Image: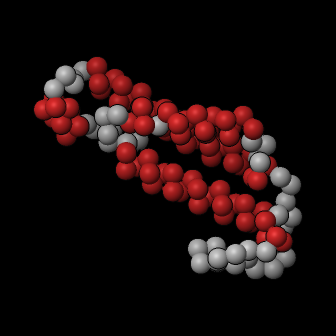
Amino acid sequence: DFLNRKTKSAKEALPNFEVALKLSKDFYDKTETKDYVFKSCIEELKNHLEIIKRSMSFPELVIPICHTLGQFKKRCINPPYYNIIRELYGKIRKVTDKLQEYRKSVDLTSIEGCEEASAKLDLGNC
């Protein structure tokens, strides 16, 4: 809801959000503030996904993320945010599909098989 509200452009310089402890209410309604919050969240989410994408359980780990992104896409009225979320969701689906195909071709019934499969996993440039 915060990201869907109408905003005003900032007339003064915005504070450094990485060190700000408290913001005045004037900054909450600025487009730049919302853009910063959105981009920071997306960057942190991408970092998290980059770490877990080599896990064989990636498809199960991203179910809550995909659900949340889907809900956001349905309610989002800001086209740039919608496009970023759609692109991120597409990349997650691509990695998930690739992993599910890979799972079918390996033996995952033993711990050794799982470790060997994870070591040989090649996701390319996903």
Q: Is residue 19 above or below residue 35?
A: below
Q: Residue at x 78, y 65 (%)?
A: 28
Which residue is situated farthest in the front direction here? 22
Q: Quadrant of residue 15?
A: bottom right
The picture places residue 19, in percent across and down from the top left corner, at 59, 78
Q: Which sits in the foreground, 111 or 84? A: 111
Answer yes or no: is residue 61 visible: yes
Which residue is situated farthest in the top direction here? 104
Q: Is residue 107 above or below residue 24?
A: above
Q: Residue at x 44, y 47 (%)?
A: 49
Q: Quadrant of residue 119?
A: top left
Q: State the quadrant of the C terminus.
A: top left
Picture mark count: 0
Q: How is the image coloured?
A: secondary structure
Q: Which sits in the foreground, 5 or 11? A: 5
Answer with left or right where residue 87 lies relative to residue 24.
left
Q: Residue at x 51, y 51 (%)?
A: 45
Which residue is situated farthest in the left direction here? 112
Q: Is residue 117 above or below residue 22?
A: above
The picture places residue 58, in percent across and down from the top left corner, at 38, 36
Answer yes or no: is residue 120 visible: no
The picture places residue 32, in percent across and down from the top left corner, at 74, 66
The picture places residue 3, in percent across and down from the top left corner, at 75, 52
Q: Is residue 60 above or below residue 53?
A: above
Answer with left or right where residue 78 lies relative to residue 42.
right
